[in-house]
Image: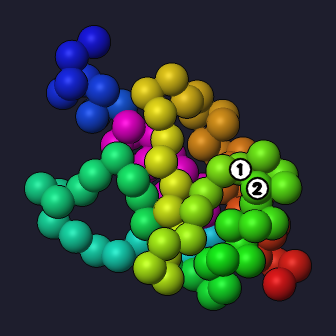
Amino acid sequence: FGIENVQKEIRRLQDIFLGAIDKTQFRPPQFPESRRSGILSLVSKNPGEVALRARSEKVFVTERGGYLRIAPHFYTSDDEMVKAAEILNGVVKTL
C-alpha cells in the first residue's frame, strides 16, 4: 500500500467522521495540513465521561490533555466511521 496511501486513507476516514459528528458538540482544533496526524483530537465537554460512555458502546476513544481522541486504522470502514460519530453524538446528548 505504501505509507503515503495509508496516510491518505486515514485522513479520508477522518474527514468522513468529521462530516458526521455534531459540530455543536465536538470541534477539532485547527492545525495546518502539514501538522495533521493519524490521531484526531476533538474539543468537547466532559471528554473523560464521553470516552467512558463511548467505550461501553464499543467506540474506542480516549481522553488526553482535555481532548477526546480517536485514531482510525487503515482497515476501518466508512460505515464504521459514521457509526462511531453517531454513537458519540448520542453519548453527548445524555450528559
Question: Which quadrant of the view contains residue 2?
Answer: top left
| Mark 2 secondary-structure assignment | helix
Marks 2/1: CA–CA distance: 5 Å
According to the picture, the residue beneath numbered tag 2 turns out to be 55
Residue placed furthest toward the top: 1
Q: Residues within 10 Å of mark 2 (few under 14, many from 20)?
A: some
Quadrant placement of the N terminus: top left
Of residues 83 and 47, the one nearer the viewer is: 47
Residue 94 magenta-highlighted: no
Answer above or below: position of 58 versus 46: above
| Mark 1 secondary-structure assignment | loop
For residue 26, side relative to residue 11 (left or right): right
Residue at x-position 66% and y-position 37%: 80
Residue 34 visible from this viewpoint? yes
According to the picture, the residue beneath numbered tag 1 turns out to be 59
Answer above or below: position of 48 versus 45: above
Expressed as whole percent of the image width and height from the top left, the position of residue 68 reads 54, 70
Expressed as whole percent of the image width and height from the top left, the position of residue 85 reads 66, 55
Of residues 35 and 25, the one nearer the viewer is: 35
Expressed as whole percent of the image width and height from the top left, the position of residue 34 reads 12, 56
The numbered disc on residue 10 is none
Given the image, on which type of amino acid does mark 1 rest? Answer: Val
Extent of the magenta region = 10-21
Quadrant placement of the C terminus: bottom right
Residue at x-position 36% and y-position 31%: 9
Residue placed furthest toward the front: 64
Expressed as whole percent of the image width and height from the top left, the position of residue 63 reads 56, 71
Of residues 79 and 36, the one nearer the viewer is: 36
